[in-house]
Image (tube, rainbow, N blue to C red):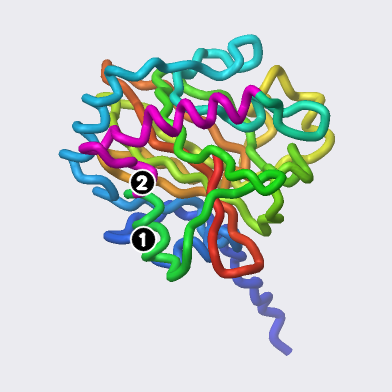
Amino acid sequence: MSTTVIAAPAVPTLFDSETADHLTADHLTRLAAGSVGSVRIPDFFGVDQCMEIMRALETCEMGSYDEQLVQPRIAKLGPAAYDFYGEGGLRREYWEHAAQSAAARSGLLHGEDPLDAATGLIAAAWGDRVDPATSGGRPLFAGMIREINNGARMHFDEVIREFNGVLDQQPIAQIAFNCHLSTGLEGGEAVAYRRRWHPGDEEHRDGYGYDRSLVAGEPAASVRAGLGDAVFFDPRNYHLVRPVQGGGRRVTLSFFIGVTARGPLVVWS
């Protein structure tokens, strides 16, 4: 009798970083299913588009996240919904800030809105509409422009867990979109880990960030984007941004994509 032990096949992590010439519905589906770590689409925006947006952005006043909570400081154009969350909904100031920011961004791309350019490409790949997410029937702001030069601490974003009931829609998956309008010489990588939030993680929380010991040994998808590249990943996984090295600015057009049980996608920031 043979005593040979047959090893079980290795279980794949399904958390690779992929690069593709163009975005497809399959990319978004696999991100939603958790079978790919990140997807990078080079030249999602052309160099001329990026340069025009950056030039026009010089005339816009940038705000920041709540600096008592988010350090290092992250400059941004547009409100983050969670900065205005209170008493089970969004405060009045959110809607005022949203309208002002959307108006400021609306002409940054040769008089047109870069958000429309991005969502148009995503809609073409998905084969259905990309609509603003809504809260109480009102469209939420989407399409933040933000500058992260000094890195972002490890955290997660999950609208259903953090702000349950705020969105009229109930996304079954959440995808982060970042199109790089300017990049640093080195560094600035986005790193996502194959690790979701657990209740016990709150013991390792400091402000908005979590201790990186929580992801020790976990598979990671690291992406160093070039100018105009779009990067997609599941922000419900812990993720961070490494600091820019050697000078330059890391500026992105950013929003979340919600995959629902119906056809259209929804977006918000």
In the rendering, at what x and y percent does residue 134 appear? Answer: 63, 47
Q: Residue at x 26, y 46 (%)?
A: 45
Q: Is residue 195 above or below residue 245?
A: below
Q: Main secondary structure of the magenta part?
A: helix
**Disc 1 or 2, which lies upstream in sequence?**
1
* Span highlighted in magenta in the image: 93-116
Q: On the rendered structure, is 16 left or right of 210?
A: left
- Determine the secondary structure under disc 2: strand
Of the 4 image quadrants, the one containing the C terminus is top right
Q: Position of residue 11 (x, y in %)?
A: 61, 65
- Alpha carbon separation for disc pair 1 and 2: 9 Å
Question: In the current view of this chain or complex, which residue is farthest to the bottom?
Answer: 1
Whether residues under marks 1 and 2 lie with C-beta atoms below 8 angstroms apart, the answer is: yes
Label 2 neighbour load within 10 Å: few <14, some 14-19, many 20+: many
**Is residue 100 a member of the stretch shown in magenta?**
yes
Out of 68 and 14, give the one closest to the viewer: 68
The residue at which mark 2 appears reads as 230
Residue type (three-letter) at the residue carrying disc 1:
Leu
Task: Decide: is 29 above or below 90.
Answer: below
Q: Amino acid at mark 2?
A: Ala
Q: Which quarter shows the N terminus?
A: bottom right
Disc marking residue 23: 1
- Residue at image coords 34%, 26%: 250
Compared across the picture, whether 143 is left or right of 164 comes to: left
Q: Residue at x 60, y 63 (%)?
A: 33
Query: For residue 200, which quarter of the picture?
Result: top right
